[in-house]
Every structure is written in C-alpha cells, then in structure tokens.
Image (cartoon, rainbow, N blue to C red):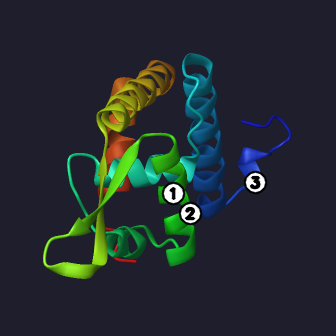
Amino acid sequence: MTPDVELENLNLIDLLSERHIATRRITELAWDKESDIQISNSEWLIMAHIYKQQPTIASVTKNLDITRQATHKFIKNLAAKGLVEVQNVENNKKEKCIRLTTLGEECHEEHEVVKKQLENQIAKKIGVDQLKILKDILKGDWEI
C-alpha cells in the first residue's frame, strides 16, 4: 500500500480499489520472485476462469468483461508462454475453446498458494474472525 494514500478519507469504492491494487501488487511481486514466467493480472484472471474447464474464447470475453481484442491478445501471450492451448470447438468452424496446459495448471495452482499465503498474513493482522466476516460481506448479494 502506498504510504501517501490517506485511507481515512476514502469512500468505499476507493478503499476497495486501493486494497485490490495493493494485494494484486503483492501477489505479483511474490510470483515474480519465485518464477521466470511473467504473468500479468489480466492473464491470471483468464487462467483462473479457464482452470479445469475448456470455455470458448467468446465466453471468456463475455464473462470477464474484457474486449474481444484484449482477450485474444492475452490468450496469444499465454499460448506463447506455453500456459494455454487453443483448439477448435467440435462441430463449429468459427468458435475456439481454450484450456490450460499442464504448465498452466501448475502455475495456476502455485499462484493459488501465493494468494493463500497473503490471505493468511491478512488473517494474522486483522484476525481470522474479521477475515471471515470480510469475505462473507464481499460474497454477499449487494443487489447492485
């Protein structure tokens, strides 16, 4: 977290944004320290979405609210790193599906460990009960 940010004066939206940026930065730095494979936050998001599945590229675009062009760019980058494979959809010449390679699954699983370690650090700082409450609030239906 950047020290010059006055959290006390931020509204909910900006507080969520600051914490999101900080936690993503921490996990990114932790991953980069352990691995030679550079993976952007958007690429991690795509990998998490396709883990143990084979969605179409169109469904990834729709579900992640990323432009079609950006999705294709990220998938091309992931394929170049050997993390995903793109295949034709059976009985459909236009659609393509995407799946993680063995390396991609290993990276995703290792990244989950990194995120769990950060979550444990947060639990130590704010308390296990408070973390559970926070997660329950974030999972809840805000009707927005």
Residue 108 vertical placement versus 18 (above, below): above
Q: Which residue is mark 3?
A: 9
How packed mark 2 is, by other alpha carbons closer than 10 Å (few <14, some 14-19, many 20 or more), is few
Residue 88 visible in the displayed image: yes
Residue 137 visible in the displayed image: no
Closer to the camera in the image, 53 or 143: 53
Q: Which mark is residue 76?
A: 1
Q: Which mark is residue 116?
A: none
Q: Secondary structure at mark 1?
A: helix
- In three-dimensional space, the C-alpha distance between marks 3 and 2, rounded to whole angstroms, equals 38 Å
Q: Kindly identify the residue that appears in the image at 45 percent across and 25 percent down.
A: 114
Q: Secondary structure at mark 3?
A: helix
Closer to the camera in the image, 107 or 84: 84
Instruction: Locate the C terminus and report the quarter of the image it occupies.
Output: bottom left
Nearer to us of marks 3 and 2 is: 2
Residue 62 location in percent, x, y?
A: 38, 76
Three-letter residue code for mark 3: Asn
Q: Kindly identify the residue that appears in the image at 46 percent across and 49 percent down.
A: 79
Image position of 129 (left or right of 23): left
